[in-house]
Amino acid sequence: MTAEREIEALLADLHTTPLGEERIRKNVSLPGGDVVAWCRERLIAPDAIIERRGKNFYVTSGGYTLTINAGSHTVITAHKH
């Protein structure tokens, strides 16, 4: 699969677990709203750098880094820079 198609699939299937949602909110100080929508915004931002290392994607965008499992498209965590 090409990188472009992989990113399209990633956007369509992006999700997180309840514990992942809690961890992301805490790490990036996100008060409310849809965590997955927030992550999608980071992915499609013009400054987004998407890199695959092993089994994960690392997305750097807007002062944050997201870790996403490449196989399941689950957002594992996010951190402020």
Image: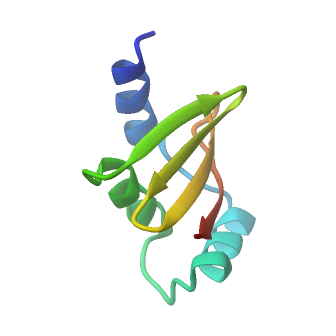
Residue 55 lies left or right of residue 68; in this view the side is right
Residue 5 lies left or right of residue 56; in this view the side is left
Quarter of the image with the N terminus is: top left
Identify the coloring: rainbow
- The picture quadrant where one finds residue 8 is top left
Residue in view at x 64 percent, y 27 percent:
71
Residue 60, position as x, y percentages in the image: 49, 53
81 or 19: which is nearer to us?
A: 81
- The picture quadrant where one finds residue 9 is top left
| Image height of 51 relative to 45, above or below | above
73 or 18: which is nearer to us?
A: 73
Q: How many dots with numbers?
A: 0
Residue 26, position as x, y percentages in the image: 67, 82
Residue 47, position as x, y percentages in the image: 31, 52
Residue in view at x 71 percent, y 72 percent:
23
Residue lying at the far left of the rendered structure: 46
| Image height of 32 relative to 81, above or below | below
Residue lying at the far bottom of the rendered structure: 31
Residue 5 lies left or right of residue 15; in this view the side is left
Residue 44, position as x, y percentages in the image: 30, 49
| Image height of 76 relative to 38, above or below | above
Residue in view at x 25 percent, y 51 percent:
46
Residue in view at x 43 percent, y 71 percent:
34
Residue 54 lies left or right of residue 2; in this view the side is right
Quarter of the image with the C terminus is: bottom right
